[in-house]
Amino acid sequence: MRRIHVGNALSAFGLGFTVPYLYVYVAQVRGLGSMTAGLVLAVFAVAALIVLPFAGRAIVRRGPLPVLLAALVSAALGSLSLGLAGNATAVLLAAAALGAGQAVMQPALATMIVDCSTADTRSRAFATQFFLQNLGLGVGGLIGGHLVDTTRVSSFTLLFAIEAAMFLVLVAVMATVRMPHSPRMEDAPAPSARGGWKQLLGNRAMVQLSVLGFVLFFACYGQFESGLSAFGVEAAGISTSALGTALAANTLMIVVAQFAVLKFVERRRRSRVIAAVGLIWAVAWVAAGYAGLGHGSQKMATAAFVSTYALFGLGEAMLSPTVAPLVADLAPEGMAGQYNSAFALVKQLALAVGPAVGGPMGASLHAPYIVTFLLFSLGITALALRLGRRLTEVQDQPWLRTSRVVARGEAPAESLAA
């Protein structure tokens, strides 16, 4: 588990070097224009959508470690090629390799965490993963910002080379991991292997969680660098430096609050924790609305806008030890890879649709934008409470596994099927 967490931190650290500067690199430094830069961002999403349906089956049949190693090699080659690419075709091909590798890493690492943790330690393990990812991205972005020079292509080549090196270091670290045996699809009867996706879609709780996950990612992550930033600049008059401060506030909130929040959520119903996140994000959208639609001073508008990103960070810190472990608990034995990949696919769909819908609205339809996403946040609360009625007591309250009542078998079966 320690190696897995080190690997998460290294990969996030490498990504932090390039993610904030990708658009500038393609459009301006390479001189390929905004259209090509936009296509590169689209290629990342399309590559993920293509490979994720196959990644789940591969993880189930072969195990997460071989799939992760293949994804890391693909990402390293894509990153290095992106730093050296000089024309649009080469840039798009490199982006496809990098995007596919990054997409497959997520469910592979999540499945490794599931296999190396117990029900008691899983929430803390995923919280640690999320903490290290944000810390790595923040530190990588900070260092990359001091290395980059828009007048020199070589400075960007260096950034992409560092990112590729981090992926290869992660290959070396992960190659030393000895995973505990867990059931694979090849251990299961043939009908189960053929019906993996059908079995998943037949799991009503997982389908409801996927719908909830889409709304979560659409209403939050899908707006960070598109609709919400456009709203801040156009409606609230937020400067680019203040926008950077808001993004930093989001990361800082996660890093500072993650383990304090973990203690709060570990003994709460998962469905109610997610419902509370919806309410917190509703408050965040109200603060954003005040920043752009209110008539206060510019300082007050900036403070309200920064608080919006901080409140989103608080909600993210509550979700990290809640949603991913719930996906694992909903998966039948040996199917964690399939379920993690399906949920990653839902995330990618939301991240693809979110900016396309939110960007134009945030830039021009200011009041409807705030109202729409305020309603989406309240919808998260409603969907989470509805999901809670579908979950078993142990899925919603995982600590019951070790409670004296359940351990002795004194709880009636009906209560566990509720």
Image: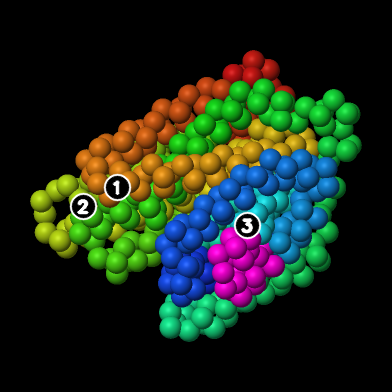
C-alpha separation, residue under disc 2 versus residue under disc 1:
8 Å
- In the rendered image, the vertical position of residue 240 relative to residue 191, given as above or below: below
Q: Quadrant of the C terminus?
A: top right
Q: Is residue 81 magenta?
A: yes
Residue 51 place in picture, x, y as percent:
68, 47
Check whether the beta carbons of the residues at disc 2 and disc 1 lie within 8 A of each other.
yes
Amino acid on which disc 1 is placed: Gly
Residue 401 visible from this viewpoint: no
Residue 39 place in picture, x, y as percent:
50, 56
Q: Which residue is drawn at 55% across and 65% down?
A: 88
Left or right of 223 on screen, residue 188 = right
The residue that mark 1 highlights is 362
Does label 3 or label 1 sit earlier along the sequence? 3
**Secondary structure state at the residue bearing disc 3:** helix
The crowd level at tag 2 (other Cα within 10 Å; few <14, some 14-19, many 20+) is: many
Amino acid on which disc 3 is placed: Ala
Residue 165 visible from this viewpoint: yes
**Secondary structure state at the residue bearing disc 2:** loop
Specify start and end residues of the magenta stretch as a single range: 75-96
The residue that mark 2 highlights is 235
The crowd level at tag 3 (other Cα within 10 Å; few <14, some 14-19, many 20+) is: many
C-alpha separation, residue under disc 3 versus residue under disc 1:
28 Å
Q: Residue at x 70, y 34 (%)?
A: 331
Check whether the beta carbons of the residues at disc 2 and disc 3 lie within 8 A of each other.
no
- In the rendered image, the vertical position of residue 6 relative to residue 200, given as above or below: below
Residue 247 place in picture, x, y as percent:
38, 61
Q: Residue at x 15, y 61 (%)?
A: 298
Left or right of 66 on screen, residue 238 = left
Query: Which label sits on residue 96?
Result: 3
- In the rendered image, the vertical position of residue 244 relative to residue 108, given as above or below: below
**Secondary structure state at the residue bearing disc 1:** helix
